[in-house]
């Protein structure tokens, strides 16, 4: 061993190499290996201390305290690294980096169907159980299906009953369908009697206030067979109302006019808000209109080649928003389409 200055340099180098070896250790055995080489019982620093006897008293003091300080520092870093490596290994072993079972659970808030879709699905389910199948048709409809084949002649004032959106097109006269009734015609073109279908869908009219939206939904119904009468219509709609609004809600058929039914009726249900006593919602009449209906006009059968001597049928069309508003006591139709989650999440 040389001078104390050379020995001090050596201790300093061993201290730095020892720290680097500890820092580079990835597991317990790396750490133990570093300890063995640098500051364990037979490590390089201990060897220096063992050789200290050959130095002068002065040198012994300096080298002894430097070596002990270096060893103590390395020892303490060793303990720290050992604890942290053991903790990492425990976390990995127990999968705690992925799952802390002591944390409160993260609750999943499921979405749900829009109240209009719910009401639509409920209406469809009632009619399915009553033996009706579901048909569809295009939202952009030919004038022929929306009006003409439903016995609205061109220029007929009945067309003004509905504020139609016309679509510019080279493909002929197109409209956004103003009702689901065109699906009656499309269905009868495809099928021979017996026909028992409903047709749900969006419809469009240029109209907007607290009870009208330019887009809303209807469910159309059509039954054609031999010997179908108005009593069948009345029985079906009575059952529909019982299943939708509960028992004991009287229905009222009022004479009305639609070009595609004869006779035609508008059907009212006893006010679900006041029970018939009269209130703001039913405008004190005790009744609420829920749909239009009637016996299929023989002129309509003419458009689809059904023989009106052989077959008869009934049809009806109801507004889905109307029914949802009555079921939930909602007074402004526009709430359905504002997408305010505070409103929608109530249903
Ligand atoms: N399409 C009519 C409307 O939107 C409703 C309607 C009335 C449909 C009578 C029918 C019916 O099938 O028979 O105002």
Image (spheres, rainbow, N blue to C red):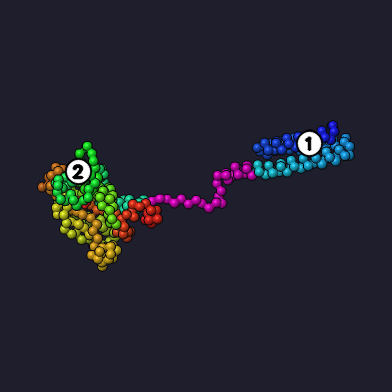
The image position of residue 215, as x and y in percent, is: 28, 49
Badge 1 crowding class, 10 Å Cα cut-off, few under 14, some 14 to 19, many 20 or more, is: many
Question: Residue sitting at 51 percent across and 51 percent down?
Answer: 105
Query: Dot 2: within a 10 Å radius of its alpha carbon, few (fewer than 14), some, or many (20 or more) residues?
Result: many
Residue appearing at x 21%, y 58% in the figure: 267
Disc sitting over residue 143 in the figure: 2
Q: Is residue 210 above or below residue 224?
A: below
Q: Read off the residue under disc 1.
A: 11
In depth, the one of 91 and 297 nearer the eye is 297
Q: Give the quadrant of residue 55.
A: top right
Residue 70 lies in the magenta stretch: no
Q: Is residue 36 visible?
A: no
What label does residue 68 carry, if any? none
The magenta segment is 87-112
The outermost residue toward the front is: 168
The quarter of the rendered structure image containing the N terminus is: top right
Residue 124 rendering spot, x and y as whole percentages: 28, 50
Seen at 16% across and 58% down, the residue is 255
- Secondary structure of the magenta portion, mostly? loop
Label 2, ligand 1: CB separation under 8 Å: no
Q: CA distance from mark 1 to mark 2?
A: 99 Å
Furthest toward the right, the residue is 56
Residue at (19% x, 52% y) in the render: 161
Secondary structure, mark 1, is helix
Q: Earlier in the sequence, mark 1 or mark 2?
A: 1
């Amino acid at each position: 061993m040389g001078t104390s200055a050379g020995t001090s340099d050596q201790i300093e180098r061993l201290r730095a190499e020892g720290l680097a070896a500890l820092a580079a250790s990835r597991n317990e055995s790396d750490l133990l290996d570093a300890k063995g080489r640098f500051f364990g019982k037979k490590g390089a620093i201990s060897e220096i201390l063992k050789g200290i006897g050959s130095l002068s008293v002065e040198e012994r003091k300096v080298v002894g305290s430097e070596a002990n300080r270096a060893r103590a520092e390395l020892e303490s870093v060793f303990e720290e690294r050992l604890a942290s490596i053991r903790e990492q290994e425990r976390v990995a072993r127990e999968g705690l980096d992925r799952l802390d079972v002591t944390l409160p659970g993260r609750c999943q808030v499921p979405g749900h169907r829009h109240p209009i879709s719910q009401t639509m699905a409920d209406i469809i389910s009632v009619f399915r159980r009553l033996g009706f199948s579901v048909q569809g048709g295009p939202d952009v409809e030919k004038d022929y299906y929306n009006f003409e084949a439903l016995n609205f002649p061109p220029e007929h004032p009945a067309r003004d009953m509905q504020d139609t959106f016309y679509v510019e097109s080279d493909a002929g006269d197109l409209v956004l369908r103003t009702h689901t009734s065109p699906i009656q015609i499309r269905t009868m073109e495809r099928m021979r009697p017996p026909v028992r279908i409903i047709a749900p869908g969006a419809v469009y009219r240029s109209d907007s206030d607290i009870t009208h939206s330019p887009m809303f939904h209807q469910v159309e119904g059509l039954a054609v067979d031999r010997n179908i009468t108005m009593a069948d219509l009345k029985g079906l709609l009575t059952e529909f109302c019982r299943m939708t609004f509960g028992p004991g809600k009287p229905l009222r058929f009022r004479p009305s006019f639609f070009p595609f039914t004869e006779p035609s009726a508008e059907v009212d249900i006893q006010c679900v808000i006041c029970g018939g006593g009269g209130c703001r919602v039913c405008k004190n009449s005790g009744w609420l209109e829920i749909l239009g209906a009637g016996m299929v006009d023989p002129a309509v059968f003419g458009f689809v080649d059904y023989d009106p001597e052989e077959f008869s049928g009934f049809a009806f069309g109801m507004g889905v928003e109307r029914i949802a508003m009555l079921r939930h006591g909602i007074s402004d139709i526009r709430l359905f389409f504002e997408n305010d989650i505070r409103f929608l999440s109530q249903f």
